[in-house]
C-alpha cells in the first residue's frame, strides 16, 4: 500500500540505525520500509528463533502495508491473544485487516466485547457509520468524478485551490529531485495546473512561487485572506537533511508569501507535520501530526495564529474526530469539517468524512461520504468550494482502480454538499429544583411512529449529544427512575436553532412532589378548604389542584386516590354525602384539565370518619380545631413503584 507509506511514514528516513538499539536484519528492512523483503527475512529468522511479540507486530504491519490482510489479521490476533503490547493504532490495523479478509461480522463481534483502547465516541461513531453504509443513503446516486488530465504515472495528490488554478503534490521525476528510496519515486514537489469549468485540470507545471528544494515540498494550502501558501517541507540544515538522534528526518510546516521568504511555523526534528489548512474565520491553522499523547496514528490538531504566526500550543480535536487510525487532510467548508481517516469502520483504506462544526467548538459525528466518493482503496484530501450559480466544485485524491498512477486527483461538480444530512441535538438534563445536571438520565429520540431512533445516557454533568440521520419531525424524551418524564416535539423549523444553541430538559424528582400525611404518600399541596357546606371549586382550590395536573403531566404513570373528609358538625350521613360530592368535584376538575380516568383509581368521601383530633360528636372544640378535620388528600397509591 504505497499511498499510506507516501503520506504518513515515508517522510521519516532512518540514517543511522547503528545509533539505536541492536536490530535484526528483518527489523532493519522493516524500519527502512522494505516490507516485502522484511517479510521474507522475518520468516527466515523465525525458523531459527521464535520472534518476539514486537517483531510479530512488525511482520503483521508489513503484510498490512502490502495488502496481505488475511496474514496480517491472523498475526495481529495471535499477539492480541497472548499480550497487550499492541497500541490502539495497531488494533485499528487489526480490525481493518479483519474487515477486508473475513468481513464485518468478526469486527463487530470484537467490538461487542469492549476494549479499553476504544472510546465511547469511537464505538458510537462506528455504529452510526455501519448503519449508514449498510443503507442506500450513502450511495451518492449520480455522483461522477473525472480523472484530471494533469495526473501522471507517479503519485499526484493533495489538491489545493489557488485563485483560478489548482496546486497539488506530485512525485513525478524532476532534474532537481533525487529518487526517494522508500517509494522508488522522486521527492515530492508542488505543481500547478489550470482548472477548467468542467472540473478538469490541464497543463501541469512545477510551481515556482516557493523556493526550490532538493527534498520534500508537499500538501500546499493557499490562504486568500493572507495571500500566502502553507506547505510541508523536509527539515534541512546547510543544504542537507536534518536528522534527530534516532536518525529520523521529519516534515515541518512552512509559510511563504509573494516575497518567497520562508517562515517555519511548526518544526520538530522528531515529529512530522502534515496537511496544513488555514481557517481565516477562526484564525486557526489545522494540521495532522503523530504526537505521543494522541489517539492513535496521526491526529488532527489546530493552533491559534496571528497573520499565520503561531500563538499557542496545539489543540487535539478530540476523540469524536481522532481515532486509533490515521486522520489527515482537514478542510473546512460551510461549517463542516472534511477530513480523511483509515479508521476500521470505513469502506476501505483512507475514506473521506464530514463532521458538522458547531458554534461551541464541538464536532458532530463524522459521516462517511459514502460510495462513489469513497472506495475500498485510499480516498483522501477532499477540497470543495462554491462554483458560481453552478453549485459546488471539488477535488480529492484516490488510488482507486482505473487511475493513471499510484495516486490520482479526481475532480467533481455537484449541486449540494456531499454526505448524508443529519439531525443533531445537544443539551443537559437537569433537576428543576436543584438546578443540577442529572447523571445517567436516559434521553431518546423517537419518530412520529414512536419508534426509538437513538438512545443515550447523560454524563455526570447531565450533558448529552445525539446525532441521527435527518428526520423532518421527532420527539426528544428524557427520564430517569424517580424522576418525571419530559417529551418535547421538534419540527424542521426548530432544528437549526437547537443544533447551535442546545437546550435544557428539566426533570422533577418525585420525592420533591410527595409528602407523608396520615401514614400515606400524598401530593404536596397547600391545605385548601371548601366554603361553608359548598362543593364549588374556588380559585384558591383550583390553584392547588393545578399542581396535581402538572404532577400527572410530569409523571403519567401516577395512580391517584382522592380522599375528602369533613368535621363532625352536622349529621353523619349529611357529612358523608357532602364529602363525596366534594371528592367528585375534585375528580371532575382534574379530568376537565386533562388528567386521564386511568390515573384516578378512586374518589371517595369519608365524611367525619378518621378525625385527626378529639373533636367528635358531643365534644366541645374551638372552630380552628374543627377545621383541622376538613381536609382533602390526593394519595399516590403507586409511589413505591416509581
Image: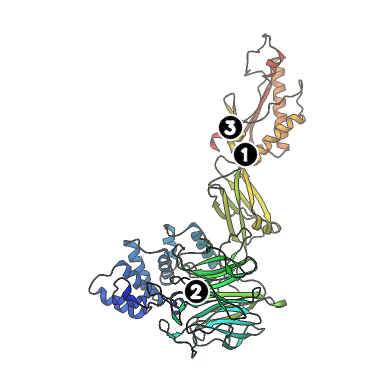
Q: Is residue 399 visible?
A: no
Check disc 2 and report the residue beneath it: 252
Q: Secondary structure at mark 2?
A: strand
- Most distant residue in the bottom direction: 175
Q: Is residue 606 visible?
A: yes
Report the front residue among 545 and 596: 545
| Tags 1 and 3 touching, CB below 8 Å | no
Instruction: Indicate which label's residue lies in the foreground, 1 or 3.
Output: 1
Q: Is residue 178 left or right of residue 548?
A: left
Separation of marks 2 and 1 at Cα, in angstroms: 54 Å
What residue is rendered at 68% in x and 9% in y? Answer: 620
Res. 606 image quadrant: top right
Q: Quadrant of the N terminus?
A: bottom left
Q: Residues within 10 Å of mark 3 (few under 14, many from 20)?
A: some
Q: What label does residue 595 carry, if any?
A: none
- Most distant residue in the left direction: 48
In the image, residue 456 above or below residue 74? above
In the image, residue 187 above or below residue 141? below
Q: What label does residue 637 carry, if any?
A: 3
Q: Residues within 10 Å of mark 2 (few under 14, many from 20)?
A: many
Res. 581 image quadrant: top right
In percent of width and height, residue 137 lies at 59, 68
Check disc 1 and report the residue beneath it: 433
Separation of marks 3 and 2 at Cα, in angstroms: 71 Å
Tell me which label, 2 or 1, sits earlier in the chain.
2
Amino acid at each position: 500500500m504505497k499511498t499510506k507509506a507516501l503520506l504518513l511514514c515515508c517522510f521519516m528516513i532512518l540514517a543511522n540505525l547503528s545509533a539505536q538499539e541492536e536490530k535484526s536484519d528483518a527489523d532493519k528492512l522493516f524500519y527502512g520500509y522494505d516490507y516485502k523483503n522484511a517479510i521474507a527475512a522475518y520468516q527466515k529468522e523465525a525458523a531459527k528463533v521464535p520472534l518476539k511479540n514486537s517483531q510479530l507486530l512488525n511482520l503483521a504491519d508489513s503484510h498490512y502495508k502490502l495488502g496481505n490482510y488475511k496474514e496480517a489479521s491472523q498475526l495481529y490476533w495471535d499477539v492480541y491473544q497472548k499480550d497487550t503490547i499492541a497500541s490502539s493504532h495497531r488494533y485499528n490495523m487489526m480490525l481493518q485487516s479483519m474487515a477486508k479478509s473475513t468481513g464485518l461480522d468478526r469486527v463487530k463481534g470484537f467490538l461487542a466485547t469492549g476494549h479499553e483502547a476504544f472510546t465511547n465516541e469511537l464505538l458510537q461513531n462506528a455504529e452510526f457509520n455501519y448503519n449508514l453504509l449498510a443503507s442506500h443513503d450513502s450511495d451518492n446516486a449520480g455522483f461522477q468524478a473525472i480523472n484530471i488530465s494533469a495526473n501522471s504515472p507517479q503519485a499526484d495528490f493533495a489538491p489545493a485551490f489557488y485563485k483560478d488554478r489548482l496546486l497539488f503534490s506530485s512525485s513525478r521525476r524532476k532534474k532537481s529531485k533525487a529518487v526517494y528510496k522508500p517509494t522508488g519515486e522522486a521527492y515530492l514537489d508542488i505543481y500547478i495546473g489550470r482548472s477548467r469549468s468542467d472540473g478538469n485540470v490541464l497543463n501541469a507545471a512545477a510551481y515556482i512561487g516557493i523556493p526550490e528544494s532538493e527534498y520534500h515540498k508537499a500538501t500546499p494550502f493557499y490562504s486568500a485572506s493572507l495571500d500566502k501558501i502553507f506547505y510541508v517541507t523536509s527539515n534541512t540544515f546547510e543544504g542537507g537533511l536534518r536528522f534527530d538522534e534516532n536518525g529520523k528526518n521529519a516534515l515541518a510546516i512552512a509559510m511563504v508569501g509573494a516575497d518567497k521568504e520562508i517562515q517555519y511555523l511548526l518544526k520538530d526534528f522528531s515529529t512530522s507535520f502534515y496537511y496544513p489548512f488555514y481557517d481565516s474565520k477562526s484564525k486557526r491553522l489545522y494540521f495532522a501530526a503523530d504526537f505521543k499523547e494522541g489517539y492513535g496514528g496521526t491526529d488532527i490538531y489546530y493552533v491559534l495564529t496571528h497573520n499565520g504566526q503561531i500563538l499557542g500550543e496545539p489543540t487535539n480535536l478530540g476523540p469524536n474526530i481522532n481515532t486509533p487510525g490515521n486522520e489527515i487532510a482537514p478542510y473546512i467548508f460551510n461549517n463542516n469539517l472534511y477530513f480523511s481517516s483509515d479508521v476500521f469502520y470505513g469502506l476501505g483504506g483512507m475514506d473521506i468524512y464530514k463532521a458538522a462544526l458547531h458554534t461551541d467548538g464541538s464536532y458532530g459525528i463524522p459521516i462517511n461520504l459514502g460510495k462513489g466518493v469513497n472506495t475500498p482503496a485510499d480516498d483522501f484530501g477532499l477540497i470543495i468550494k462554491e462554483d458560481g450559480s453552478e453549485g459546488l466544485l471539488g477535488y480529492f485524491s484516490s488510488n482507486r482502480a482505473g487511475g493513471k498512477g499510484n495516486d490520482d486527483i479526481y475532480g467533481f461538480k455537484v449541486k449540494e454538499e456531499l454526505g448524508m444530512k443529519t439531525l443533531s441535538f445537544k443539551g443537559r438534563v437537569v433537576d428543576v429544583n436543584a438546578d443540577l445536571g442529572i447523571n445517567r438520565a436516559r434521553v431518546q429520540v423517537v419518530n412520529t411512529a414512536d419508534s426509538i431512533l437513538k438512545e443515550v445516557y447523560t454524563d455526570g454533568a447531565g450533558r448529552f449529544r445525539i446525532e441521527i440521520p435527518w428526520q423532518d419531525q421527532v420527539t426528544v424524551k428524557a427520564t430517569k427512575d424517580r424522576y418525571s418524564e419530559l417529551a418535547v416535539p421538534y419540527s424542521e423549523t426548530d432544528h437549526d436553532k437547537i443544533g447551535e444553541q442546545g437546550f435544557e430538559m428539566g426533570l422533577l424528582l418525585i420525592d420533591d412532589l410527595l409528602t407523608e400525611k396520615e401514614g400515606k404518600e400524598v401530593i404536596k399541596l397547600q391545605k385548601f378548604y371548601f366554603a361553608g357546606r359548598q362543593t364549588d371549586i374556588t380559585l384558591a382550590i383550583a390553584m392547588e389542584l393545578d399542581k396535581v395536573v402538572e404532577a400527572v403531566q410530569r409523571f403519567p404513570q401516577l395512580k391517584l386516590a382522592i380522599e375528602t373528609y369533613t368535621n363532625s358538625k352536622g349529621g353523619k350521613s349529611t357529612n358523608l354525602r357532602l364529602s363525596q360530592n366534594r371528592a367528585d368535584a375534585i375528580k371532575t376538575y382534574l379530568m376537565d384539565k386533562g388528567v386521564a380516568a386511568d390515573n384516578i383509581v378512586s374518589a371517595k368521601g369519608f365524611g367525619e370518619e378518621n378525625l385527626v383530633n378529639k373533636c367528635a360528636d358531643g365534644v366541645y372544640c374551638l372552630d380552628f380545631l374543627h377545621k383541622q378535620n376538613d381536609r382533602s388528600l390526593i394519595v399516590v397509591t403507586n409511589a413505591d413503584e416509581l
